[in-house]
Image (spheres, rainbow, N blue to C red):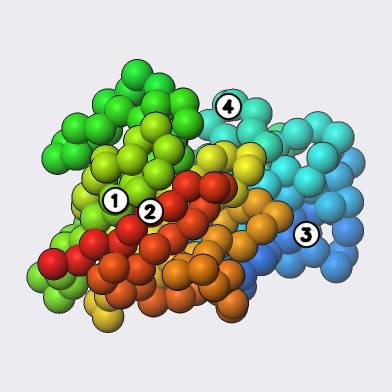
């Protein structure tokens, strides 16, 4: 699905395929990706694969983790992003070369990208997207309708292959469009999202028309024609 290309001073040292749900990176030999350099903490960062998304999270490292020159705590990786740890550069690449669009959390006053023209008030959950190109017409289009709170009645079309919903730092989930339909996965937060009052069990759950998702106190209905 994706790979990491590790380089130092422009020279490629290793390439690592991302195949596990969690891939650890650090100086200690038990990490999945070992970088034996004092600028790298023993347990420096972890990459987590959620559906088609790959997140990187800094594990309170001494020198920090940077993406494209910006310090990050946890962030969704996009095609061609460069992770910088000390003097090492780690490029994230999607094998088919399709560009990812960065996940965007809607904030008050912002407008959602076309075709959805939606601005989330402060009490509403955030919505983001990560595009991988079209999967064809195998999946019937769907949307999410907010049922409670300040954004009640708002509807957001699931136009991307992966859409993130929730409140960053509190509870976030992803809805992924697959050839067989849409699936919900837990991304972050201590509590699992629920579907029709039942907490998510396992990594993902397939969504059906009319399912009610509850996330960070907000209820959303999955609508599929």
Pointer 2 with pointer 1, Cβ within 8 A: yes
> Mark 4 or mark 2, which has the lower sequence index?
4
**The one of 114 and 20 positioned closer to us in this rendering:** 114
Identify the residue under disc 4.
69
Residue 21: image x %, image y %? Answer: 61, 70
Q: Which quarter of the rendered picture does the C terminus lie within?
A: bottom left
102 displayed left or right of 70: left
| Label placed on residue 34 | 3
Secondary element under disc 1, as helix, strand or loop, is: strand
**The one of 103 and 58 positioned closer to us in this rendering:** 103
Identify the residue under disc 2.
220
Image point (34%, 47%), residue name: 146
> Mark 3 or mark 2, which has the lower sequence index?
3
Q: Quadrant of residue 111?
A: top left
> Mark 1 or mark 3, which has the lower sequence index?
3
Tell me how far mark 3 sits from mark 2, CA to CA.
Answer: 42 Å
| Label placed on residue 145 | 1
Specify the farthest residue to the left.
Answer: 137
Tell me how far mark 4 sits from mark 2, CA to CA.
Answer: 36 Å
Secondary element under disc 3, as helix, strand or loop, is: strand
Tell me how far mark 2 sits from mark 1, CA to CA.
Answer: 5 Å
Between circles 3 and 2, the one closer to the viewer is: 2
Between circles 4 and 3, the one closer to the viewer is: 4
Image point (81%, 32%), residue name: 63
148 w.r.t. 111: above or below: below
């Amino acid at each position: 699905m994706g790979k990491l290309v590790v380089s130092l001073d422009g020279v490629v040292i290793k390439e690592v395929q991302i195949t596990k749900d969690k891939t650890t990176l650090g100086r200690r030999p038990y990490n999945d990706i070992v970088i034996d350099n004092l600028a790298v903490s023993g347990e420096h960062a972890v990459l987590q694969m959620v559906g088609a998304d790959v997140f990187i999270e800094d594990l309170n490292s001494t020198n920090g983790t940077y993406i494209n020159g910006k310090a990050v705590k946890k962030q969704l990786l996009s095609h061609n992003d460069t992770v910088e740890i000390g003097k090492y550069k780690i490029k994230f690449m999607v094998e088919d070369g399709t560009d990812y669009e960065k996940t965007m959390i809607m904030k008050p006053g912002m407008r959602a990208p076309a075709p959805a023209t939606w601005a989330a008030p402060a009490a509403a959950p955030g919505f983001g997207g990560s595009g991988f190109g079209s999967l064809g017409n195998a999946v019937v289009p769907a949307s999410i309708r907010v049922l409670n709170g300040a954004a009640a009645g708002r509807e957001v079309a699931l136009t991307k292959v992966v859409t993130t919903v929730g409140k960053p730092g509190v509870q976030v989930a992803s809805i992924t469009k697959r050839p067989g339909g849409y699936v919900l996965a837990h991304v972050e937060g201590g509590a699992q999202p629920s579907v029709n009052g039942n907490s998510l069990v396992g990594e993902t759950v397939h969504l059906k028309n009319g399912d009610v998702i509850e996330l960070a106190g907000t209820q959303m209905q999955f609508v599929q024609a």
